Amino acid sequence: MKLSPTFGSPSLTNDCQPGEPLWRIVPTRDENGRLLTDFMMLIPRLCEKSASEIERVTGHIRSILSLHSEVVFADLNLALNLLWVSLRPTRGAMAEITAAIRVLVPEAVLVANQGRTS
């Protein structure tokens, strides 16, 4: 399952085909050429959950990300139980988004973030 790379409105698809490596598809700059920042969250054992539970979690994530215009890319890798999000650097946005995800998906853990400066 993938939260597809659409500017401002991540959408969920049920694409079970092998995907491109993230280093090839993750944007590093926004539509204005400004550098983006990234974070990853581990959602332990998500891939072991029922289809309805996975759909519930992805729905929560989608609803949270859609509220934040800073988000330009999101990918949920079920094989790795890993959510990758790229966003425009905005003070407090990463903390706000990760906290909101943790409220609805308490098992989600922030494992990495990459702040970039121009």
Image (tube, rainbow, N blue to C red):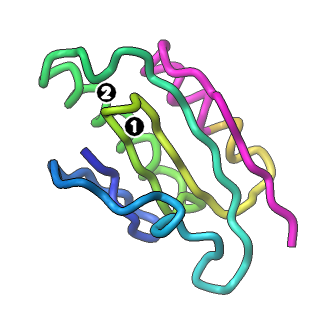
Q: Residue at x 53, y 62 (%)?
A: 23
Residue 57 pos. (x, y %): 31, 27
Q: Which residue is mark 1?
A: 61
- The answer to whether residue 23 is magenta is no
Question: Is mark 2 in CB contact (under 8 Å) with mark 1?
Answer: yes
Residue 20 pos. (x, y %): 36, 62
The residue sitting at the right extreme is: 117
Is residue 97 found left or right of 107 in the rendered image? right
Give the number of the disc on residue 95. none
For the C terminus, which image quadrant? bottom right
Residue 46 pos. (x, y %): 32, 20
Circle 2 sits in a helix, a strand or a loop, which is it? helix
Give the number of the disc on residue 57. 2
Q: Amino acid at mark 2?
A: Val
Q: Amino acid at mark 1?
A: Ile
Is residue 95 found left or right of 67 in the rendered image? right
- The answer to whether residue 114 is magenta is yes
Instruction: Give 109 or 79, whichever is nearer the viewer.
Output: 79
Q: Is 114 located above or below residue 37 in the figure? A: above
Circle 1 sits in a helix, a strand or a loop, which is it? helix
Is residue 63 found left or right of 84 in the rendered image? left
Q: CA distance from mark 2 to mark 1?
A: 6 Å
Q: Residue at x 38, y 42 (%)?
A: 76
Q: Which residues are magenta?
A: 97-118
Is residue 81 found left or right of 14 in the rendered image? right
Q: Residue at x 66, y 37 (%)?
A: 96
Crowdedness of circle 2 by 10 Å Cα count: few (<14), some, many (20+)? some
Residue 36 pos. (x, y %): 68, 65
Crowdedness of circle 1 by 10 Å Cα count: few (<14), some, many (20+)? many
